[in-house]
Amino acid sequence: MTADPMPTNGRRLSRRGKFTGVPVPTATGSAFGEPGDIVEVVGRHVALAPHGDHQLRGDCPFCGSTAPAFIVRPDHGTFHCLSCGEGGNAARFAAAIDR
């Protein structure tokens, strides 16, 4: 009979059996629901226009760039500004816009 393996405390083991320090994901999604919800959250503050098949563009609410450098990717649930570098998911956008 073998002993129970050592508890991982939410960390992954590498191939050699050592802890990597990377937490094991326990749940999917965010507090704002599905990744597609980012369009709803960002759309309250930014006028978004389709750009290509899988992204939307608009003016950045953080740096005030008037070039359409603010990108929203609904499939990934993320946003990113090419001018100021601000980016993240719907929760991060909501927190940053309230600052």
Image (cartoon, grey):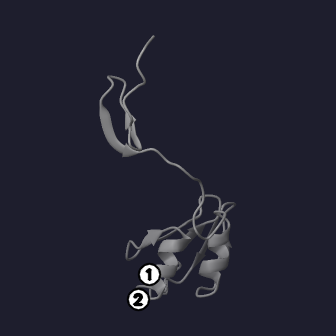
50, above or below 21, in the image: below
In contact (CB < 8 Å): disc 2 and disc 1: yes
Tell me which residue sits at (37%, 44%) in the image: 22
Q: Quadrant of the C terminus?
A: bottom left
Q: Which amino acid does label 2 sit on?
A: Arg
On screen, 10 above or below 1?
below
The residue that mark 2 highlights is 99
Residue 36 in sight here: yes
> What residue is pinned by disc 1?
96
Mark 2 surroundings within 10 Å by alpha-carbon count, few (fewer than 14), some (14 through 19), many (20 or more): few
Q: In the rendered image of this protein, does residue 72 appear above or below residue 95?
A: above
- In which image quadrant can residue 49 be found? bottom right
Residue 48 visible (yes or no): no
Q: Quadrant of the N terminus?
A: top left
Q: Is 17 above or below relative to 95?
A: above
Q: In this view, does 73 lie to the left or right of 50?
A: left
Tag 2 secondary structure = loop
Residue at 31% from the left image edge and 35% from the top image edge: 19
Mark 1 secondary-structure assignment: helix
Going by the numbered disc 1, the residue's amino acid type is Ala
Image quadrant assignment for residue 78: bottom right
Please state which of residues 5 and 67 is positioned toward the viewer in this rendering.
5
Residue 33 is situated, as x and y percent measured from the top left of the image, at 65, 66
Q: Quadrant of residue 50?
A: bottom right
